[in-house]
Image (cartoon, grey):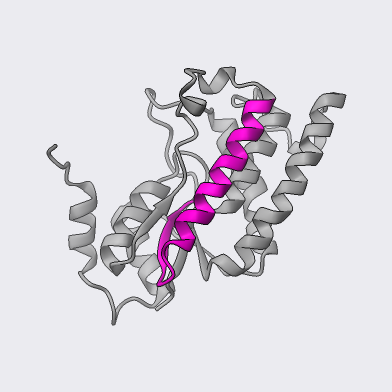
């Protein structure tokens, strides 16, 4: 069975739900970085009010979190996202903002001098992130944008999500790690992922039970 799995996709595409279900199905621990919507460093800054410096700080912080989380699970893991996500989010946020008004491709967008300098720095850090991904993961399980964001959970807009996938997928493919897209509802996605991962013989539970555990609310 493949044991270093990264569930990838744009914000709000269902990565957390699928990675949780996969962790139940395989018995592998789930790893993740801090949610990007959380205030930076406890300073109370809204995601829409971060300075460029704070965005760079968050990018490095989340990258370090992922490295440490993955290194702590040498027997394998299911990652909610990947190190490549940190580069995608920072680059897209710098150039287009969190709520782009159009779907103009990133390469065709205007950059101020400051933005161009910061973007170059993010791209240099991104080289480290993508190099790490080449050896850190055995497979990327990609979840496409198939449904809208919850109205109460919108740190980005739909244009940001679509631009994110357009930037993410080529970067993932360039690592040489297999990328497999799964679609449909959670049960469909989990069944497709299980086939790609070859977990039929080693699953600790069946798909229906993994879905049930993932979707049943827990009591505190």
Q: Which quadrant of the rendered structure holds the C terminus?
A: top left
Question: Of helix, strand and loop, which mostly describes the magenta segment?
Answer: helix
Camera-side residue: 18 or 134? 134
Kindly give the residue lying farthest to the right in the view shown.
Answer: 113
Camera-side residue: 142 or 126? 126
Residue sitting at x 74%, y 38%: 105
Q: Is residue 83 left or right of residue 102?
A: left
Kindly give the residue lying farthest to the left in the view shown.
Answer: 219
Residue sitting at x 36%, y 54%: 18
Kindly give the residue lying farthest to the bottom in the view shown.
Answer: 201
Camera-side residue: 86 or 67? 67
Q: Is residue 98 left or right of residue 155?
A: right
Residue 172 screen position, x and y as percent: 63, 59
Q: Is residue 62 magenta?
A: yes
Residue sitting at x 40%, y 27%: 153
Span highlighted in magenta in the image: 53-81
Depicted 34 relative to depicted 75: above or below: above
């Amino acid at each position: 069975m493949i044991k270093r799995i990264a569930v990838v996709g744009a914000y709000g595409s269902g990565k957390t739900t699928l990675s949780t279900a996969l962790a139940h199905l395989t018995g592998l621990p789930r790893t993740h970085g801090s949610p990007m919507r959380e205030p930076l460093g406890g300073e109370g800054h809204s995601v829409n009010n971060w300075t460029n410096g704070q965005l760079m700080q968050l990018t490095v912080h989340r990258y370090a979190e992922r490295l440490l989380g993955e290194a702590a699970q040498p027997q394998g893991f299911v990652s909610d996202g990947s190190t490549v996500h940190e580069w995608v989010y920072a680059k897209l946020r710098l150039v287009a903002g969190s709520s782009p008004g159009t779907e103009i491709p990133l390469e065709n967008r205007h950059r101020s001098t400051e933005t161009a300098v910061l973007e170059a720095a993010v791209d240099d850090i991104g080289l480290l992130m993508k190099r790490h991904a080449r050896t850190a993961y055995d497979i990327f399980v990609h979840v496409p944008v198939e449904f809208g964001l919850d109205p109460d959970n919108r740190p980005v807009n739909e244009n940001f999500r679509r631009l994110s996938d357009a930037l993410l997928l080529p970067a993932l493919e360039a690592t040489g790690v297999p990328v497999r897209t799964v679609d449909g509802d959670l049960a469909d996605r989990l069944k497709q992922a299980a086939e790609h991962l070859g977990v039929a013989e080693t699953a600790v539970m069946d798909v229906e039970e993994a879905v049930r555990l993932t979707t049943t609310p827990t009591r505190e």
